[in-house]
Amino acid sequence: MNKWLVLFRKEWLEMVRNYKVIWLPLVFVVFGLLQPITLYYLPDILKNAGNMPEGTVIKIATPSSGEVLCETLSQFNQMGILVIVLAFMGIVAAERRSGMMKMILVKPVTYTSYILSKWVSALLLTFVSLSLGMLAAWYYTILLIGSFPFVDLAQGTGIYFIWISFLLTFTLFLSSRLKSSGLIAALALLLGIVLSLVTPLLEKWMKWSPAQLTGAASSLLTEGAAQGNVLLPLTITILLTALFLYLAVREP
Amino acid sequence: MGFSSINWALVAPLIGIELILMIIAVVDLSKTTTQTNGPKWMWVLISLFFSIIGPILYFTIGRKHT
């Protein structure tokens, strides 16, 4: 445990040194703030966009607070995943390439605790970033549009975090096996995109799909209750996350 | 909507964060002694002119991890 803490601290130091600790949360906060502001100013933006004939009347109903937060979540689902995968694609692969990994593993630490320290620190930073982003969106939504219960926000973000941590664990697994950072990012993004695309199309056969969690989180935010069966995708996702983590800690 | 009718109190945090990201990227570029992927001046320009996306790209793919 003590050795693990040393590795964990080394991971954090690394993330401070390459500024990940600063820019990852900031990026999520920016996307969180951007969504309520754009939706609030949308009529003005359209009016100023030009190319409208004289006298055009645009009427857009102001979205509800839940809808704005749901939009924020879907924004995180695109830009957020991209940023997280890019940030953590080299988490193991880069250290193997630079020879850092060999230097660490000659010391009396196991490969498992080495990978686990990386997994926990990446997960923690992702959780903090996602929460800060959603809190920023929540704050601006309350200011601009209307109140929204914090419990629903926390539940929606929590369910969504499970889906993100699944993709993060998959990225870590790929990073522990492959050499090329580009290939790792491409494969991880491919899994995220394919699951997100195929799940709504083949609703019937994809009830177990981890991507169902994004739908559940969205309906939690817009309607206050998750639609459909959440327990099945939740269990499957957690099992798959555990599987990929197990595969990642096995020495190649 | 004129220049003055924008609620600057709302937009200020956004601009602030953009500036912070930009400044960190440029300061890191000026300090770092290791090579970057691609010429340094290119990353300076990208970080300065593409708000948010530019610094992110630099941190993720521009920086060589050592």
Image (cartoon, rainbow, N blue to C red):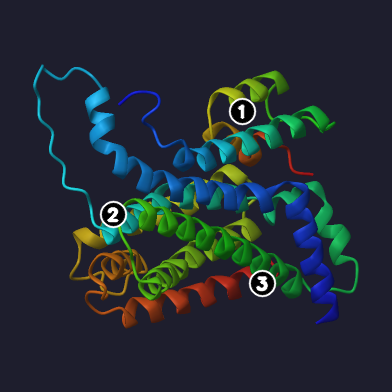
Residue A249 numbered tag:
3
- Using the image as rendered, state which of residue A164 and residue B16 is in the foreground: B16
The residue that disc 2 covers is A197
The residue that disc 1 covers is B47
Q: Amino acid at mark 1?
A: Ser
Residue B54, given in percent of the width and then of the height, sits at 57, 31
Residue extending farthest right? A107
Position of B64 relative to A237 (above/below): above
Position of B4 relative to A84 (above/below): above
Residue B52, given in percent of the width and then of the height, sits at 54, 36
Residue A201 numbered tag:
none
Q: Amino acid at mark 2?
A: Leu
Q: How many marks?
A: 3
Instruction: Say whether residue B8 is left or right of residue A96.
Output: left
Which of marks 2 and 3 precedes in the sequence?
2
Q: Which subunit holds the residue at mark 1?
A: B
Instruction: Say whether residue B42 is left or right of residue A75.
Output: right
Judged from the image, the secondary structure of the residue bearing numbered disc 2 is: helix
Asked if marks 2 and 1 fall on the same chain, the answer is no
Residue extending farthest front? B4
Judged from the image, the secondary structure of the residue bearing numbered disc 1 is: helix
Q: Residues within 10 Å of mark 3 (few under 14, many from 20)?
A: some
**Residue at coordinates 48% horizontally, 62% vertically from top-left?**
A167
